[in-house]
Amino acid sequence: MAKERISTVHVLATSPPWEPIPNLGIHGTGIPSVGTQSQPRHPQIGFKIANCPVIPMISPAMMKALDRFSARVDWFSERLGRVVCWLILAMVLIASYNTVARYSGRYLGINLTSNALLELQWYLFSVVFLLGGAYALKRNAHVRVDVIFERLSPKARASINLAGTFLFLIPFSCMMLWATWGSVASSWAIMEQSSDPDGLPRYPVKTLIPIAFILLIFQGLSEAVKQVRVFRGKEDSSVAKKDSI
């Protein structure tokens, strides 16, 4: 009788993808129920629910395609991040010049700075902040308050990262795309300029807002692929090294 009480979860986890699921009755007790569960599952993606959380079982061919996608996204984020890093130096130099020029101009009685240079300073900050987000996510450089996370197993950490990606990062990025698209389109329609004399155009820097969240979505998907590798026993070496620091 004990052998007949096979759990439905165990059967779903161990049966081949196209094998019909036997009718185990009500709650796997062997009591016959109406109808049979003969619908085939997807040939490439099944779900092993014997050990929670639910782990996607992806075919080698699909995993190879996802790896290529992740590598290309990582390559682009890395190159873009390195370029953006140099803008920090430019921002510091412009800010230093504005400070020196402002006080020197007062002493000399002439204006050595302008609104364009002042706005360029925070324009560069906006570029670094917006376009550097995907690079920071790729490098795992965002601020974490790790009290329990670092003590968990790699698969538990991967589960948390996957949940954070699909429940928070991607939905929030999509919401921001929807919320800012109208403002960016309106800014381009009127070729929005600064309200200060000799200021810079506003529409180019506003365009970076949706671009930044698109980059975050792609990098978030790339990070999700890396977490899937953890479940498959192929944790990315750079991620493992970063977590061990």
Image (cartoon, rainbow, N blue to C red):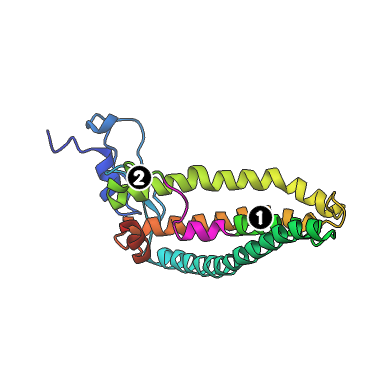
Q: Which image quarter: residue 85? A: bottom right
Residue 136: horizontal and vertical position, in percent?
A: 50, 58
The segment highlighted magenta reads 132-144
Magenta residue check for 125: no
* In the foreground, 102 or 39: 102
Q: Which mark is residue 193?
A: none
Compared with 26, 154 (above or below) is: below
Is any part of residue 4 visible from this angle? yes
Q: Earlier in the sequence, mark 2 or mark 1?
A: 2
Q: Residue at x 36, y 64 (%)?
A: 236
Magenta residue check for 141: yes
Q: Amino acid at mark 1?
A: Ser
Compared with 195, 98 (above or below) is: below
Task: Using residue 219 as the reference point, say whether residue 103 is left or right of it.
Answer: right
Quickly name the residue at label 1.
126
Quickly name the residue at label 2.
54
Mark in front: 2 vs 1: 1
* In the foreground, 73 or 149: 149
Q: Amino acid at mark 2?
A: Val
* In the foreground, 110 or 179: 110
**Structural crowding at the residue carrying mark 1, measured as other residues with C-alpha within 10 Å and reported as few (<14), some (14–19) or many (≥20):** some
User: In which quadrant will I find the C terminus?
Assistant: bottom left
Is any part of residue 47 visible from this angle? no
Task: Using residue 2 as the reference point, say whether residue 147 is left or right of it.
Answer: right
- Alpha-carbon span between mark 2 and mark 1: 39 Å
Compared with 19, 52 (above or below) is: above
Q: Residue at x 12, y 34 (%)?
A: 2
Q: Residue at x 47, y 64 (%)?
A: 70
